[in-house]
Image: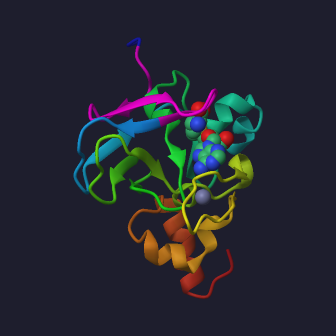
Amino acid sequence: MLNQPTCYLSPKATARLKTHREYGVYAIAPIQKEEMLAMWGGEVVTQETFETLPERLRRLSIQIEENLFLVALNEGPSDYVNHSCEPNGGLSGQIELVALRDIAAGEEITFDYAMSDGSDYDEFKCECGAPACRGTVRGTDWRDPALWEKYAGHFSPYLQRRIEKIKRGETV
Ligand SMILES: C[S@@+](CC[C@H](N)C(=O)[O-])C[C@H]1O[C@@H](n2cnc3c(N)ncnc32)[C@H](O)[C@@H]1O
Ligand SMILES: [Zn+2]
């Protein structure tokens, strides 16, 4: 095994402490729209297994399918990307983060967890500070049709399938 984090972060970004205990990821060079920001990796586990894991591991994980989660067993800087209700990053597939717009050096890199979260494992009071902050981040945020428009093409594929079903009038 390679002794390295199970994730990859663009060399144009770094993780550092944001508060006394919370990390964030920050651009350290200008990043262009659509550039790759991060690629997450780890161990794929079922929801049943996921629910037995310690809280610290769960909050650094990402849901990648209806019943599957990617758990960062060897955590690294890209596991510390925070949520924002006005993000500059978005998903491309299940595990890649790309820039939604040009990002200046010094800006925090964020994405909206509504793009990935389809269950309630990581709900919290949001402190993103955006003027239109939702206040609370929930596993049901992906249901908001306004976000379907705002993040078109940037939802995790399993959530996009759910969205398409709702649009067809099916119950999800
Ligand atoms: C993947 S971690 C992000 C890295 C985290 N800041 C750390 O240092 O471990 C996700 C957790 O970070 C916190 N977090 C992320 N975005 C946040 C936000 N906008 N407001 C408040 N807490 C946030 C929540 O506790 C969430 O469960
Ligand atoms: Zn917010």
Task: Identify the residue at image location x=39%, y=56%.
Answer: 88
State the image coordinates of residue 159 (x, y, percent, origin top left).
54, 64
In the rendered picture of this protein, how many numbered marks are placed on residues? 0
Drawn side of residue 103 relative to residue 134, left or right:
left
State the image coordinates of residue 135 (x, y, percent, origin top left).
69, 61
In the displayed image of the protein, which residue is found farthest to the right? 52
Drawn side of residue 150 relative to residue 131, left or right:
left
Q: Is residue 55 magenta?
A: no
The magenta stretch spans which residues? 4-24
Quadrant containing the N terminus is top left
State the image coordinates of residue 163 (x, y, percent, origin top left).
54, 74
Drawn side of residue 129 relative to residue 89, left or right:
right
Task: Identify the residue at image location x=41%, y=71%.
Answer: 152
- Whether residue 61 is visible, yes or no, is no
Q: Quadrant of ligand 2?
A: bottom right
* Looking at the image, residue 96 lies above or below residue 49: below
